[in-house]
């Protein structure tokens, strides 16, 4: 039985003081969630404050990115050890905004996934198509490829620690959610590729999230689909409404 996981990707929002204030609002609402794992992914500079603020609750903290080298002359980058030392348990990797604005390729995402796992961080690996790719009918091919390359050389023991987030780019921040059926279709295709690579037993253990305009109104139905084990939430994770999504 896969434990549901709902993560808030705060993106480039909230100063440390604002992060603390938001967590104080959300903590009583989602802090004792047992059947759903709750993860907040604030910007790097808010991580220390967030880790402190969630102490004594079940909320986990994740980062939104990470570099794949251990340390050294990589100005502006953040190393896996730094995230671990700061108290992160998760790290979002390969978000479409990283891929789109910062040129992250499938190969870079794979390097990051391997490095995160080596340091005991659990990667939330994002995959998803543009509207143009969907209209061209290549969604499943693309998502299969993104998933397979991201997990290249990842052992079955490590694969079960990863979470795959299916985020159609056309649904991100647009208020245009994929239908339950569209989301389930792609998440099922992801489960299929995981089965091909790792076998049924491992594939059944890996959690797959849907992300893209998830809100309090649509979360319940999306999360009820057989291959959707929770959500990666952007905009709606910055409000008290996030608790309705977790409780969905
Ligand atoms: P929105 O929920 O704002 O559409 O963002 C989704 C997302 O990109 C989460 O990573």
Image: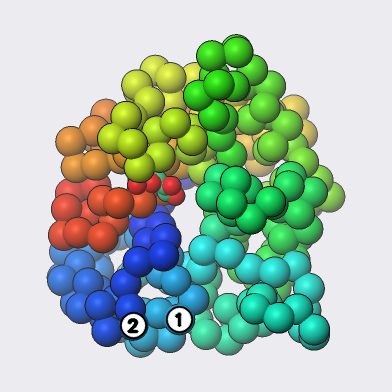
Residue 68, quarter of picture: bottom right
Residue indicated by mark 1: 45
**Quick check: can you spot residue 163?**
no
Taking the image as shown, residue 77 lies to the left or right of residue 97, namely right
Report the disc number at residue 164: none
Q: Residue at x 36, y 85 (%)?
A: 49
In the image, residue 11 sits, relative to residue 141, either above or below, namely below
Q: Which quadrant holds the C terminus? A: top left
Query: How many residues crowd mark 1 within 10 Å: few (<14), some (14–19), many (20+)?
Result: few
Q: Residue at x 24, y 47 (%)?
A: 245
**Quick check: can you spot residue 78?**
yes
Residue 30, quarter of picture: bottom left
- Say which of 46 and 164 sits in front: 46
Report the disc number at residue 16: 2
- Say which of 3 and 99 sits in front: 99
Q: Residue at x 74, y 45 (%)?
A: 106
- The Cα atoms of the two marked residues, 2 and 1, are separated by 7 Å
Q: Residue at x 68, y 38 (%)?
A: 147
* SS of the residue under disc 2: helix
């Amino acid at each position: 039985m896969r434990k549901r996981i709902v993560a808030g990707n705060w993106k480039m929002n909230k100063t440390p003081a604002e992060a603390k204030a938001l967590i104080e609002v959300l903590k009583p609402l989602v802090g004792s969630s047992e059947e759903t794992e709750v993860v907040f992914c604030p910007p790097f500079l808010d991580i220390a404050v967030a880790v402190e603020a969630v102490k004594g609750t079940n909320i986990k903290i994740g980062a939104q990115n990470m570099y794949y080298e251990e340390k050294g002359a990589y100005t502006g980058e953040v190393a896996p050890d730094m995230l671990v030392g700061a108290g992160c348990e998760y790290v979002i990797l390969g978000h479409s905004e990283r891929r789109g604005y910062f040129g992250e390729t499938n190969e870079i995402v794979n390097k990051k996934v391997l490095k995160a796992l080596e340091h005991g961080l659990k990667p939330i690996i994002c995959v998803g198509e543009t509207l143009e790719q969907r209209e061209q009918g290549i969604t499943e091919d693309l998502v299969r490829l993104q998933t397979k390359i991201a997990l290249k050389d990842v052992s079955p023991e490590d694969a079960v620690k990863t979470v795959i987030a299916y985020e159609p780019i056309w649904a991100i921040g647009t208020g245009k959610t994929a239908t339950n059926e569209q989301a389930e279709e792609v998440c099922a295709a992801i489960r299929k590729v995981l089965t091909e690579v790792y076998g049924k037993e491992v594939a059944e253990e890996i959690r797959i999230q849907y992300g893209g305009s998830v809100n309090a109104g649509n979360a319940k139905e999306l999360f009820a689909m057989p291959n959707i084990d929770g959500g990666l939430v952007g905009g709606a994770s910055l409000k008290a409404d996030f608790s309705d999504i977790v409780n969905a």
